[in-house]
Image: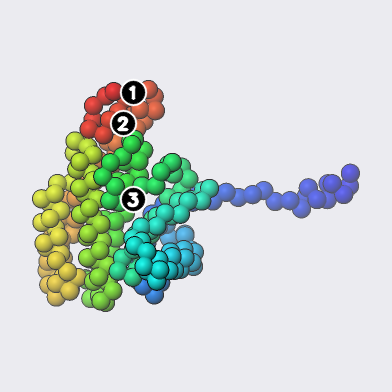
Amino acid sequence: MAILKQFSRAQKPLSLERLPQGCFSVHRGGSLVGSTLPSTFAEKTMSEIARVVLEAFRQAQSANVPLTDLYIHFSGLTVTAREMRGGALIFLNPATLNFLRPTTLNAMHYKNLDEFILHLENYIECWKQFNHYVNLARERRVTRDDENQFLEVKSIIAQGLEAILVSTDKAGPRKEDVNSLFQQAASLRHLSENPEAIAGVETQWHKIYLGMQSLLGQLKVTQGKTEKGSGWSLFGTKK
């Protein structure tokens, strides 16, 4: 009995840590460009995830296998990555947001409201990355890789917008506003050479960003009602 008591005193309670939600982008060499993950999430861990993702894309390229999206599912975390001209945009979603089928940013149809909310949350993370690149232009720390990835982020945003527009009739970002913003932010070089244009870009970005957060809030309210028994369809009609 004394032995059992000795082992029980040596045991320490397990501390559960909340898995992160957000995304980060890396260059082809694995260097971190920007992150929307919590500051408590170790950069070393991000680097290790990026190393595995980039190696998968490189091996696929060496084997002449067209691979632009990567989906890795663990028991507690889902990693979704998008190839970005040698680099990658990597999303982390905790288990509470995992669903039976992977959701990619350019998927045009969703089976349920949960899938659509996950897509929209990832889409909003892309917009945070867009703002990070604008800040690089303000600081005039733009490299060729930054420029290439900025164009890729805009491409992902444009594709994701189409998916949102065809999937809901609720208030959301207008295509005209997004196109106008992209015209103002044609390239990072343009912004770095015209710092007076950055204020206008940020104002427009903020307007669109708040609109998407509003849409996400509406959908989560609907999600809560659905869990209580109400019906829902992607186009806002009850079933």
Q: Secondary structure at mark 2?
A: helix
Gap in Å between the C-alphas at discs 3 and 2? 22 Å
User: Is disc 3 surrounded by few (<14), some (14 to 19) or many (20+) residues within 10 Å?
Assistant: some
Q: Against 10, is 115 above or below?
A: above
Residue 59 spot, x, y in % from top left: 43, 69
Question: Looking at numbered disc 1 in the image, what kind of residue is underneath it?
Answer: Ser
Q: Residues within 10 Å of mark 1 (few under 14, many from 20)?
A: few
Q: Is residue 200 left or right of residue 210?
A: left
Q: Position of residue 58 (x, y in %)?
A: 40, 70
Q: Closer to us: mark 3 or mark 1?
A: 3
Residue 86 in view, yes or no: yes
Amino acid tagged 2: Thr
Contact, mark 2 vs mark 1 (Cβ under 8 Å):
yes
Disc 3 and disc 1 in contact, CB within 8 angstroms: no
Q: Which residue is identified by label 1? A: 230
User: Which residue lies under the disc numbered 3?
Assistant: 104
Tell me the number on the disc at residue 222.
2
Residue found at x 34% / y 62%: 66
Q: Residue at x 46, y 54 (%)?
A: 72
Q: How many marks?
A: 3
Task: Please tell me which residue is depicted at 27% across the width and 67% down the height of the picture.
Answer: 149
Q: Amino acid at mark 3?
A: Thr
Work out whether mark 3 precedes mark 2 in sequence or the reverse, and give the earlier one. 3
Give whichever of 60, 22 is nearer the camera: 60
Mark 3 or mark 2, which is nearer to you? 3
Q: Earlier in the sequence, mark 2 or mark 1?
A: 2
Q: Quadrant of the N terminus?
A: top right
CA gap between label 2 and label 1 equals 9 Å
Residue nearer the viewer, 64 or 2: 64
How would you rate the neighbour count of disc 2 (Cα within 10 Å): few for under 14, some for 14-19, many for 20 or more? some
The CA distance from mark 3 to mark 1 is 27 Å
Q: Is residue 145 above or below residue 5?
A: below
